[in-house]
Image (cartoon, grey):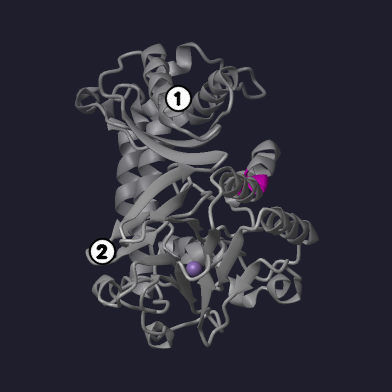
Amino acid sequence: MLRFVHTADLHLDSPLRTLAMRNPALAELVENATLTALIRTVDFCIEQSVHALLIAGDLYDGDQKSMHTAAVLTAQMRRLDSVNIRVFIIRGNHDSLSTITKKLTLPKNVHVFDDRGGRVDLANGLATIHGVSFAKPQAPNSLLPKFSHPVPNTINIGMLHTSLAGSSQHDVYAPCTVSQLDDFGYHYWALGHIHKRSVQGNKSTIVMPGIPQGRDVGETGPGTISLVSINEQGHVTVHEHTVSPVQFEIIEVDISACKEWHQLLDTLLNEIKKIRKAAPSEHVIVRIIVSGKSHLHFKLIRDKDLLHSTLQSDCDAIGTLWVEHLRIKTSKHDKHNSVVPSHEALPDLAAIINDSVLESAQVNVLASEELRVFTSKLPIEVRHLFGETEHERNRMLSKLLSEGSTELLEQLSIGDESSTEVSRPKDSRGNKS
Ligand SMILES: [Mn+2]
């Protein structure tokens, strides 16, 4: 029986994303998480006495120069070497830039496949590992022609970093189809690149293991690795094993049924607790989307920061829980439409905004410049969110202007409702302004 662990896309030394930077404690947690996931992977390999560890690309995130990461990696590979566990590595689109990879002296148990491809015998002929690395960050063509035919009377395993058939929105990397892999004659394909886990294939077992440690809220759920067993008849079994110390989650909570603020708090907290309970990772970082038609809509918009800090202190009490971001997606309750604004100037102000301000060419020029400056400060990966073409950007701009003015009017109208409780600033003559 051949047994090995398959992982990919560790992205060690991945630069921190926006979320973590706002909170230093969280930044440290996320920063250490990828290395912890690596150490746990090695622990698991030793505990399971596997023949090999397969890392199918993007071990590094890019041209990082952290000596600490290099030291941790070397030490972990030595631990595997001391118990005779082999390590097979292919380079993915991120690793091909890494300077560490080229300089690092890894112990003798580690084999890094080059871009010409090759095959290595494992466990005295029980299995053959085939692998091809990326030479450059781009790989627009299939790498399948570089793989050799299956070796007879042995278990054949292929290691490939690929976007598979790819999607039109992203660049393709070493494209190939699942059926091409299935027909290739190997028992198992150890893939990497797509950060979401999948197990496919009929004649062959084709595994995209997913990321072992998510790096932001775009990568939700527990991070796992795969423990694979293949018997002499070629029968394959795959077990998923969690290694992530931190996991991200997004929850959308409909609060339509909540009449009072305390009910809203209870509802949100219950949902957070459910997520905490179900998560296998020690730490959970959650993004909450509040939705539904609600009487509390105005208050939610106005007091979002208060809600966030209240929830966070409840989370602190539970422990190992963070609210990464709170997004208010509620709309006002239908009955609100019949409420006459208590300040007579509001309908007039709304009419001025709608008829004159939003239509004004000058306002649009100014807003467009603001958006240009704002976009230029964003990381390059998210700039497209504000439009790829001038037309899309203009559409986004009018949407933002219209949402912004609606929010402004709503805030003014709640300001008015609560005027009996809140003392207003007075002018120099002592009159309320
Ligand atoms: Mn990749």
Q: Position of residue 381 (x, y in %)?
A: 50, 65
Asked where in the image residue 172 lies, by quadrant, the reply is: bottom left
Q: Position of residue 366 (x, y in %)?
A: 49, 63
Q: Is residue 228 left or right of residue 112?
A: left
- Which residue: 48% across, 35% down? 286
State the residue position of label 2: 201
Query: Residue 365's mark?
Result: none
Tell me the CA gap for discs 1 and 2: 60 Å
- Which residue: 50% across, 40% down? 247
Q: Is residue 33 magenta?
A: yes
Question: Of residues 101 and 173, which is closer to you in this image?
Answer: 101
State the residue position of label 1: 415
Disc 2 on helix, strand or loop? loop
Q: Is residue 350 left or right of residue 227?
A: left
Q: Main secondary structure of the magenta part?
A: helix
Disc 1 on helix, strand or loop? helix
Ranked by sequence position, the earlier of labels 1 and 2 is 2
Label 1 neighbourhood size at 10 Å, few (<14), some (14-19), many (20+)? some
Residue 318 vs 134, above or below: the answer is above
Do residues under tags 1 and 2 come within 8 Å of each other at their CB atoms? no
Label 2 neighbourhood size at 10 Å, few (<14), some (14-19), many (20+)? some
Q: Is residue 235 left or right of residue 265?
A: left
* Front disc: 1 or 2: 2
Q: Position of residue 64 (x, y in %)?
A: 70, 66
Magenta extent: 30-34
- Which residue: 69% across, 72% down? 101
User: Is the residue indicated by label 1 positioned so its CB lies within 8 Å of ligand 1?
Assistant: no
Give the amino acid at mark 1.
Answer: Gly
Give the amino acid at mark 2.
Answer: Gly
The N terminus sits in image quarter: bottom left
User: Is the residue indicated by label 2 positioned so its CB lies within 8 Å of ligand 1?
Assistant: no
Residue 325 vs 232, above or below: the answer is above
